[in-house]
Image (cartoon, grey):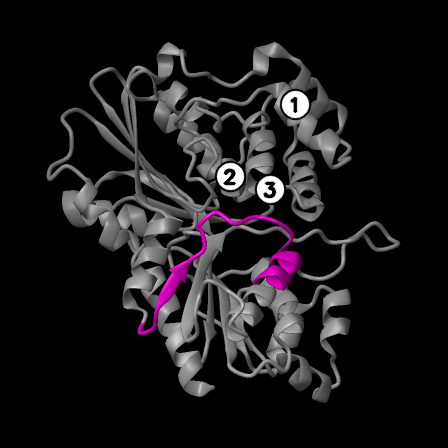
Amino acid sequence: MTDTKALLRSMFETAINAARPGIVLPPALPPRPPTGRVVVIAVGKAAAAMAAAVEMVWGPCEGLALTRYGHGVPTQSIEVVEAAHPVPDKAGQDAARRILALAESLGAGDTLLFLISGGASALLSAPLSTITLDEKAALTHALLASGATITEMNSVRRHLSSVKGGRLAAAGHPARCLSFAISDVPGDRPEVIGSGPSVPDPTTQADARAVLAKYDIPAPPSITSVLADPFFETPKHDDPRLARGQFKLIATPQMMLAAAQAAAPLPCHLLGDAIEGEAREVGRAFGGLARAVKEGKSAFMAPCILLSGGETTVTLPPKADGKTVGRGGRNVEFLMGLAGEIAGVEGIFALAGDTDGIDGAADVAGAYADWTTLERARTTGYPLGAAMAAYDGHGLFERLDDRIVTGPTHTNVNDFRAILIQS
C-alpha cells in the first residue's frame, strides 16, 4: 500500500505543479509591460504567487495582491494583503476598497492587469449599498452549508458586490483591462471564476433571488432591497465600460488532470473535469464504478487509474442550536462515500485532494482511502458510519494516518481525484 500511496501522491503533485503561477503565467505575458501606467491587481489563493510571476518578467510593478491568510509569498514591489476565506472579513473589505480606488485612478492610456484565481469571491468583499460585512458573511455561511453549487453561490455574490460581476473593470474604464485567470470552477466560465470582477455578468438579480429561494436562505432587508432594485444590476455584455477588456485562461482543471494522466504508469482514464453533486454520493457512485472495473463488468479494464476533477458539495445538517455540524471537506466526504462501497474488494486505492491544499474548513488537502479503510476505522473505535454521521472525515483520516497535508500550494484548479484499481 505504501508504494500505491506514493504513486497517487506523485500524480497529485504533478497535477498541482502543472498549474503553478510561475510556470503558466510568464509565457502568457507580453515580454514587456504595456506603455502608460500599469497597475497589477491580483486576487485569490494564487494571487501573491501570480503577482510574483509578473515581476519575474516585468520587474517591480505597482499594484496589490489580495490572498488568503498564510498564502502570501515575497514580491518585489507589489503589496501583498492577506484576508479570510471562505467567510469574508474586514481585511478583505478594506483591501477591496483600495483595489477599487486603484482601478478608478487609471486613465485612457493606462492598463489594469487583473490576475484572478479561486477564492477571489470571498476575499474580494466590498458589499453594495447598506449591506454590512457581517450580513454578507452570514449569507456566505448559509450558502456554504446549503449545498449550493459554486455557480449558484457566485450568482448571488456578484449581485451583492461593488467589485464583482464586471464592476472592477467598469471602475477602471477607460483604461484597458487585461485579465489572466487560473480556473477553479466546473466549466471554466469567466463570470464564475472569482465571481467575474472583470467580465460581463450573464445572470440577473432574479437569478440571485431564485438561488436564495431554492435553498430557503433568509436574507436581511438590506440584501433583499439590493436584489430588487434595478439600479444595482450588474454590467452586461453590451456595457461600453467593458469594451476594452481581454480575458485569458492560463490554467484549468482539465490541464492539470491531463498532466497527471500523461505521467501515469498505468492505463489512465479521465472521467471528467467538472463533476458536481453531493460529495459522499459521488464517492459512492465512483466506488461502485471501481468495483465494476475490478470485477470485469466495465468498459475499463484493470489495472488502471480513473481520474476526475470538479467541485462537489457538502450539505451540512443544522444542529438544534441552529449551527452546523462537522467541518465539511468535500474530498474527505467523497472518500468516505467511496470507502463504504469498496470495502473488502482487495486492490482498490484512492486519493482525493483540493489542489489549493485546503479541503473544507481544514488546512488539509485531502486523504487516501482503500479497500481496508472501513475495517481499519472500526478497529480504531471510530467506525466509518459514525464519522459520516458527524461529517468528520478529517477526524477519521487523521486517526488512520491517511491525511494529505501539503500546506498552501499557491494555485487552485479545483479537486483532484484518482482511483487505482489493480488486476
Q: Is residue 25 magenta?
A: no
Q: Extreme right residue here? A: 320
The disc at residue 130 is 1
Q: Amino acid at mark 3?
A: Thr
Can residue 278 be seen here? Answer: yes
What is the spatial separation of the Cα atoms under label 3 and label 1, in whole angstroms? 26 Å
Q: Which residues are magenta?
A: 265-286
- In this view, the mark in front (3 or 2): 3
Residue under the image location 64 percent in, 78 percent down? 343
Query: Left of 304 or right of it: where is 86?
Result: right
Q: Earlier in the sequence, mark 3 or mark 2?
A: 2
Query: What residue sits right under mark 2 in the picture?
Result: 121
> Could you tell me the amino acid type at mark 1?
Thr
Q: Is residue 130 above or below residue 125?
A: above
Horizontally, is 186 left or right of 248 in the view?
right
Q: Are marks 1 and 2 in contact (CB under 8 Å)?
A: no
Please identify, in this view, whether the residue under mark 1 or under mark 2 is nearer the observer. Answer: 2
> Residue 149, which numbered label?
3
Local SS, label 1: loop
Nearer-N-terminus badge (1/2): 2
